[in-house]
Image (cartoon, rainbow, N blue to C red):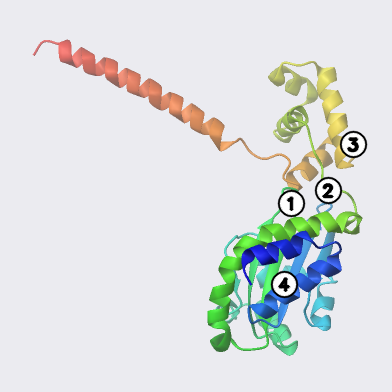
Amino acid sequence: MSLSVYLRQLETCETLDDVSKVCARIASELGFDYGLCILRVPLSFVRVSMLMVGNAPKPWLARYEEPENFTVDPVFAHCATSLQPYSWSRLREEVDESYVRRFLADARSHGLRSGVSLGLWGNNGENTVLSFTSSADELTMWRKIDGAIPLMHMILPYLYETVRHLAGPLLGEATDVRLTKREQECLSWTAEGKTNPEVAAILQISEATVTFHMRNAMQKLNVTNRSQAVAKAILLRLIAPQEPSILFTSFAQDRSMGASRMGTAAKGLAHSPA
């Protein structure tokens, strides 16, 4: 089937079970045995809510009910930090690591001998990983793996949005936080170690206004102090370091000034006596 057909199927999903069936159907039509999407949403630095849709051997799914298993999962570790697809054949190349050997042996014991996974990150710090896996070995599956990767890149954003929309309260504490521009500014300067009076001076507003925005931000983030508010805002990617565009503007101005100085110097040379 074409991408447009799969997208229409996702659009008509009314429940997570519907999404699971679409994932399994796509995997099957691409020549794989299983299609599984895992969504992890950080609630704090030590608490994570997780959701799985699709199909896989039940004992394999059960292993992900223990959070520590993610720390020894090389596939998820890669997909949590890279947008590059991860072919499970790489596990053989990294087999020197003991945790990779355990993962590989565990996967094979559950009938998972080959596969490919792709990760995506949401605006609020979510990690989503889509995996197509097979009981066949890599030599049998490599063409199907190569063929599946372009489709995975195109379909994963839609799959993520569908799961995120339907999951709702199943993910636990709300993480769909929306901060105002001023709340983000106050948190960003707080992250720089500035006190409320210092933030007020920088933003040219009153200290009471800074306190007002910080209280609103803490309420939205469901935290009790400034440090926790900064930590959670960073975790949910609500604040980040200085925007590159600002740096680029400064650089462009410097270049412009430099060009002007060079032009002046050139004129001086042109009119100077030989």
- Estimate the spatial distance between the alpha carbons at disc 2 and disc 3, rounded to whole Å: 12 Å
Q: Is residue 187 left or right of residue 16?
A: left
Q: Name which of mark 2 and mark 4 comes first in the sequence.
A: 4
Quadrant placement of the C terminus: top left
| Residue carrying label 3 | 219
Q: Count the marks: how many?
A: 4
| Residue labelled with disc 4 | 72
Q: Secondary structure at mark 4?
A: helix
Q: Nearer the viewer, mark 1 or mark 4?
A: 1
Disc 4 residue type (three-letter): Val
Is residue 67 in view from this perspective? no
Residue 243 position (above or below residue 43): above
Identify the residue at horizontal 83%, vertical 63% (top origin). 50
Residue name at image x 77 percent, y 58 percent: 162
The span from disc 1 to disc 2 (Cα, nearest Å) is 9 Å
Tell me the tag on residue 125: 1
Asked whether disc 2 touches disc 4, contact meaning CB atoms under 8 Å apart, the reply is no
Q: x%, y% of residue 110?
A: 75, 87
Image height of 89 relative to 175, above or below: below
In the depicted view, which residue is nearer to us: 159 or 259?
159
Dot 2 amino acid type: Thr
For mark 2, what is the residue?
A: 175
Cα separation between marks 1 and 3? 19 Å
On the image, the x and y values in percent for residue 73 come to 71, 72
